Amino acid sequence: MPILIVSDPSTGTSQRVEIEDSRLRPLIGTRIGQTIDGTLAEMQGYKLKFTGGTDKDGIPMRPDVHGSAKARIVLSGGVGYKPKDKGIQKRKVVRGNTISAEITFLNFTIIEAPKSKKKAPKSEEAPAEE
């Protein structure tokens, strides 16, 4: 069962939403950086930006690897590898930037919240004193 992790940058919090495999189908083919409607994450009125994820084995997605397959690439830092010393490179397995059926954790950021339907109450002016 895929899990969506939705971060709210305005409050610094995140929430976890579990969705059925059948509800993941519209997301397949979405790339890192694309925007989706929040109704897929049960958040009506929100716009969410896809920022990454991991597959069932914990292999992270990288925005600069195209497709949805695993790839062994040489990394010098960034998603998937943090070198202890400057200039060190290492060959690591990462997954491409496109959502597939093997992805289990999907990370999203809220970029647009719904407009508040409540209007601010009008402040009543005090009658002028003479």
Image: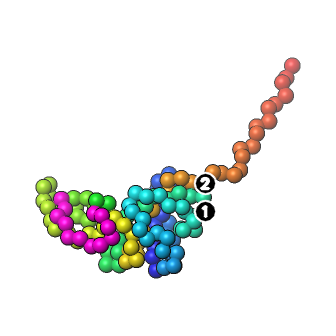
Residue 55 coordinates in the image, percent (x, y): 35, 75
Can residue 62 be seen by looking at this rendering?
Answer: no
One can see residue 71 in this view: yes
For disc 2, the marked residue is 114
Q: Classify 83 as above or below 123.
A: below
Residue 41 position, x and y percent, is 53, 68
Instruction: Please tell me which residue is depicted at 72% across the width and 46% down the height of the picture.
Output: 119
Indicate the secondary structure of the residue bearing disc 2.
Answer: loop
Closer to the camera in the image, 64 or 13: 64
Which quadrant of the figure has residue 124? top right
Q: Residues within 10 Å of mark 1 (few under 14, many from 20)?
A: few
Q: Earlier in the sequence, mark 2 or mark 1?
A: 1
| Residue under the point 49% across and 53% down | 111
**Disc 1 designates what residue?**
44
Is 95 placed above or below 49 here?
below
Q: Which residues are magenta?
A: 65-76
